Amino acid sequence: MDAHCHFWRIARGDYGWLESGGAALAPIRRDFLPPDYPGAARLIVVQAAPSLAETDFLLSLAKGDSRIAGVVGWVDLGDPGAAGLLCERADNPALRGIRPMLQDIADPDWLETAVNPRALAALVRLGLRFDALVTARHLPMLARFAARRDDLPLVIDHAAKPQPDRGEDWERGMAALAAIPHVHCKLSGLLTELSPEELRDPLPALRPILARLLDWFGPERLIWGSDWPVVTLAASYDEWRDLTQALLADLSPSERAAIMGGNAARFYGLAA
């Protein structure tokens, strides 16, 4: 299972980060839709725009492609009407979670200070999951939030985007989150955070990152995702999957199977 990929149709017009990304994002500033996806795996499709239209767009794609096992959408959790908006969309069984784009919100404490408590209660009541798109600066806040919400399964997208220097803030923050049993971590988005020098030979740079993540989360709470098509800014889908297989080579077959699909199915409440 690929637990983290994206589809978008540029003409929809709400991908602000993609439109403003300059030349660096030019290779992915075009439509990416299910027929373009290079793998055969079941998919968790994750929102890439902070709009209800994006959530509805992805849910509509799920109706037409049996590979899409689940959608992680977006609802403004600070909206007084967020609980109702969640209930309306949760009628569609493809909706498996919600992802506020925390990395793009100026206030690093937004999740603690601005979210409507009724929206969080609705997430739990509806059996939805919480994808956390964060960087190192958000990790202390996220640990406080997760510790208070042991009823809300939470996964850290892209391992919180470790930078080339890694840094004590990232290590300290991720270790604290891993100590909370219901927190998981996605093994995704790592290649696009490497420096150009590291990308020439990614394995030496990726091995210590994976070693730390395995120490903290164990193979039972790591979840593989491609982050396609964003990953193509650094490598192809196949290259990232091959790199992952090399990184996991020392694990047992059952541990590799868990990371490459079983954990995602369990976390998102899907049949294995």
Image (cartoon, rainbow, N blue to C red):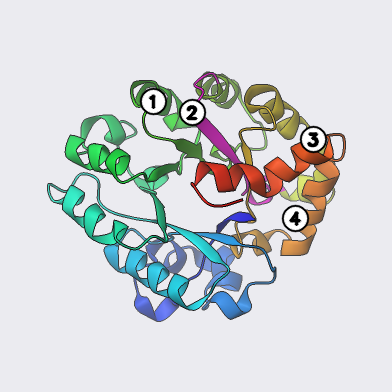
Q: Earlier in the sequence, mark 1 or mark 3?
A: 1
What range of the chain is rendered magenta? Answer: 179-195
Q: Which quadrant of the view contains residue 151?
A: top left
Estimate the x, y position of residue 69 in percent, counting from the top left: 52, 61
Q: Residues within 10 Å of mark 4 (few under 14, many from 20)?
A: many
Q: Which residue is mark 4?
A: 240
Find residue 70 and report its horizontal and vertical position in percent. Answer: 48, 59
* Marks 2 and 4, the one that precedes in the sequence: 2
Quadrant into which the N terminus falls: bottom right
Q: How far apart are the two marked residues, 2 and 4, measured between alpha carbons? A: 27 Å
**Where residue 57 is drawn, which disc sits there?**
none
Q: Mark 3 or mark 4: which comes first in sequence? A: 3
Determine whether 166 is above or below 37 in the image: above
- Tell me which amino acid carries mark 2: His
Between the residue at mark 3 and the residue at mark 4, the CA separation in whole angstroms equals 13 Å
Determine which residue is flagged by label 2.
Answer: 182
Asked whether, in this view, residue 56 is left or right of residue 160, the answer is left
* Mark 1 lies on residue: 150
Q: Position of residue 148 (x, y in %)?
A: 33, 22
Q: Are marks 1 and 2 in contact (CB under 8 Å)?
A: yes
Question: In front of the other: label 3 or label 2?
Answer: 2
The residue pinned by badge 3 equals 207
C-alpha separation, residue under disc 3 versus residue under disc 2: 25 Å
Three-letter residue code for mark 1: Asp
Q: Is residue 206 visible?
A: no
Residue at image point 68% right, 27% down? 218
Is residue 32 shown above or below 162? below
